Image (cartoon, rainbow, N blue to C red):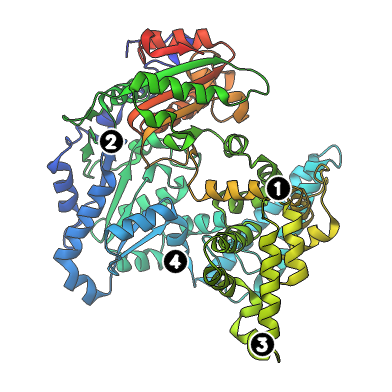
């Protein structure tokens, strides 16, 4: 990419400014990284020694085969040391970011019991579980500090507005929780559950407690004794405080276990990840680096290298035998209420350019990456159920991962029954038998007339399925059948919402979670069932859409990246600023001067992640207030040539 003058603020967002502000890059901080190839894997293998452990940071850019190196190193270690690990009752620990990544790594390692693969939340809970007295005292101190902070905010509040009421409700809740602490003998937590009840810990508390506890005995000794090797995948996105705790634990016991960090600072996309991770790596660690991109074609590697030059000095090389590939940018005027037919037209244009028929094979022929889930909801037609549920903040985690009980009713119970009804009667009744409380063996034993019960279940099943004959029923109609027949068990709040009836009113002005949840369900009930089916496909990863953040680690032959700040409606990212259409804000410039993260740096990393998903061809769609300006800035920066950018 052409060099850009640092004093030119608008041009600097595309150019080599962040590395200059930092004053040093990964190479200068850590020494010369090891080149990609057998040496990187060999160095990791030498580090994974039970007798002479050496900690390391594997610097692995997009598509460099990081997971392959991790699996290979662990496979070789457990082959060499199986008898010793088994005799000592120890396990290699691998921590990664998502459940899907855990499952993939465990599968590649053949689910070997000598290796425990878990998310950071699951690992943290496993470390602190059972230390009930320590947990209780930590909560007592933390909750008391929170109450002092909330009292201070309430004292400064000028009126009893929504924020004040929420703060008051939070303070009262924390006060009740402190009062009940001594009554709790054992604390509980589920990495994937709702964690309701006085004894339940939330996700944030588990991470914070693990960060506090693993730096000191006895938990430090327990962790080191259990795990001679701890490998943290996607280390740049691991909670910063927790990663600091791991680094301090390693520094205090350098000869007792190997801490291996794997990742790429350019792919840090979550705000609680550790900033400037490269500067925290001890000087005596090994620093292997994988520089070959084994995923992307040459043209995409050139583009992501150009994007990256504004952040650090790390560059990748493509595989020698890779294809040239295709990159195009399409700039369009941002229009209020814009429909999405333009994206279909762009897909057909990519067909003409690449002669790849899959670009025009409907949305399923490509993976379209959007910044926010609500952008997918508009394109896939489930906005009517997504928006009200997302508005209730405490429902968001369960909404986005599909574990919300009301969603599980539809995803795991109703939809499989409907799918089975299209196969044959045997499959249908088997699907009902596995899900209906009426056919639970305990219930059936208590029923005097089992034949009548089976007839009742059959009639209920017919009533449910008949709703969908050439029809797209409202969700409220489906729920009413379940209430009338008791065919399936309903979440209590959904039943309450059904009794209250469908509404389109705004949410109530209250901090009461139950009231907000019930209101969201009242809106959901008025939506057609097809929206729920569409959302089911999206949460299962079966849709042609995904978020910029959600595809890290994944790859697709054809990728369309949507850059649309106005539709996304967020403030953490700004493609308009990154592309030079808008100048950096005063806050951005202040953060840059102080060496802190800012919207431009975050957006650059996100664009790097999305563009590096493409295996064959890449289309970048820019919705901008000034598409011509965006085009020229990208050309001036050397990211793309004039022939590669079209105004649509």
4 or 2: mark nearer the eye: 2
Disc 4 from disc 2: Cα separation: 35 Å
Viewer-side residue, 250 vs 507? 507
Q: Secondary structure at mark 3?
A: helix
- Quadrant of the image containing the N terminus: top left
- Mark 4 touches mark 3? (CB < 8 Å): no
* The quarter of the displayed image where residue 254 is located: bottom left
Percent across and percent down for residue 177 are 70, 64
Q: From the viewer's perspective, is residue 635 above or below residue 54?
A: above
Q: Earlier in the sequence, mark 2 or mark 3?
A: 2
Residue corresponding to mark 1: 528
Q: Are dots 2 and 3 in contact, CB under 8 Å?
A: no
Mark 4 lies on residue: 126
Looking at the image, which is closer to me, 84 or 117?
A: 117
Residue 72: percent from left, percent from top:
20, 53
- SS of the residue at dot 2? loop
Q: Secondary structure at mark 1?
A: loop
Q: Residues within 10 Å of mark 1 (few under 14, many from 20)?
A: many
Vertical placement of residue 513 versus 200, above or below: above
Q: Which mark's residue is nearer the viewer, 4 or 1? A: 1
Q: Which residue is mark 3?
A: 450
Label 4: few (<14), some (14–19) or many (≥20) C-alpha neighbours in 10 Å: some
Measure how far apart labels 4 and 1 are at the Cα level. 42 Å
User: Mark 4 or 3, which is nearer the eye?
Assistant: 3
Between the C-alphas of marks 1 and 2, the distance is 40 Å
């Amino acid at each position: 990419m052409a060099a850009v003058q640092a004093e030119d603020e608008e041009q600097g967002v595309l150019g080599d400014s962040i590395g200059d502000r930092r004053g040093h890059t990964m190479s200068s901080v850590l020494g010369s990284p090891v080149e990609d190839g057998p040496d990187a894997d060999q160095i990791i293998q030498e580090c994974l020694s039970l007798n002479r452990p050496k900690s390391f940071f594997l610097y692995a850019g997009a598509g460099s085969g990081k997971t392959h190196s991790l699996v290979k190193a662990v496979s070789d270690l457990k082959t060499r040391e199986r008898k010793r690990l088994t005799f000592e009752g120890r396990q290699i620990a691998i921590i990664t970011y998502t459940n899907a990544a855990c499952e993939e790594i465990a599968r590649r390692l053949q689910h070997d019991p000598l290796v425990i693969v878990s998310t950071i939340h699951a690992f943290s809970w496993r470390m602190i579980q059972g230390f009930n007295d320590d947990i209780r005292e930590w909560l007592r101190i933390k909750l008391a500090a929170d109450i002092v902070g909330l009292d201070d905010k309430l004292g400064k509040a000028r009126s009893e507005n929504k924020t004040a009421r929420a703060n008051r409700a939070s303070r009262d809740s924390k006060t009740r929780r402190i009062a009940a602490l001594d009554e709790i003998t054992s604390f509980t937590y589920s990495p994937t559950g709702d964690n309701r009840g006085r004894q339940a810990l939330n996700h944030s508390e588990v991470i914070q407690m693990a960060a506090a506890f693993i730096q000191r005995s006895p938990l430090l000794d327990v962790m080191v004794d259990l795990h001679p090797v701890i490998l943290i995948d996607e280390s740049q996105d691991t909670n910063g405080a927790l990663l600091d705790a791991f680094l301090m634990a390693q520094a205090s016991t350098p000869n007792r276990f190997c801490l291996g960090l794997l990742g790429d600072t350019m792919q840090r996309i979550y705000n609680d990840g550790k900033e400037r991770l490269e500067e925290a790596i001890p000087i005596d660690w090994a620093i292997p680096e994988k520089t070959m991109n084994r995923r992307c074609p040459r043209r995409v590697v050139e583009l992501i290298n150009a994007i990256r030059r504004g952040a650090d000095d790390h560059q990748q090389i493509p595989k020698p035998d890779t294809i040239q590939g295709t990159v195009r940018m399409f700039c369009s005027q941002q229009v209020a209420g814009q429909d999405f037919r333009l994206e279909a037209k762009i897909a057909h244009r990519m067909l003409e350019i690449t002669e790849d028929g899959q670009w025009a094979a409907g949305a399923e022929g490509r993976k379209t990456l959007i910044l926010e889930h609500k952008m997918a909801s508009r394109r896939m037609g489930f906005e009517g159920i997504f928006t009200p549920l997302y508005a209730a903040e405490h429902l968001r985690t369960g909404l986005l991962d599909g574990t919300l009980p009301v969603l599980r009713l539809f995803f795991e119970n109703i939809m499989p029954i409907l799918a089975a009804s299209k196969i044959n009667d045997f499959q249908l009744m088997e699907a009902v038998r596995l899900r209906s409380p009426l056919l639970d063996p305990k219930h059936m034993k208590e029923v005097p007339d089992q034949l009548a019960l089976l007839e009742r279940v059959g009639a209920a099943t017919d009533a449910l399925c008949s709703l969908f004959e050439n029809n797209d029923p409202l969700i409220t109609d489906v729920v009413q059948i379940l209430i009338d027949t008791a065919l399936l068990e309903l979440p209590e709040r959904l039943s309450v919402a059904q009794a209250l009836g469908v509404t389109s009113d705004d949410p109530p002005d209250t901090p009461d979670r139950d009231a907000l949840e019930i209101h969201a369900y009242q809106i959901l009930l008025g939506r057609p069932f097809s929206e729920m089916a569409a959302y089911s496909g999206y949460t299962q990863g079966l849709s042609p859409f995904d978020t910029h953040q959600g595809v890290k680690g994944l790859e697709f032959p054809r990728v369309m990246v949507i850059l649309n700040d106005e539709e996304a409606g967020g403030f953490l990212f700004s493609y308009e600023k990154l592309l030079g259409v808008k100048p950096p804000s005063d806050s951005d410039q202040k953060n840059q001067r102080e060496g802190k993260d800012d919207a431009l740096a975050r957006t650059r990393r996100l664009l790097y992640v999305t563009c590096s998903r493409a295996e064959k061809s890449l289309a970048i769609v820019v919705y901008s207030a000034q598409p011509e300006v965006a085009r020229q800035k990208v050309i001036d920066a050397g990211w793309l040539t004039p022939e590669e950018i079209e105004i649509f």
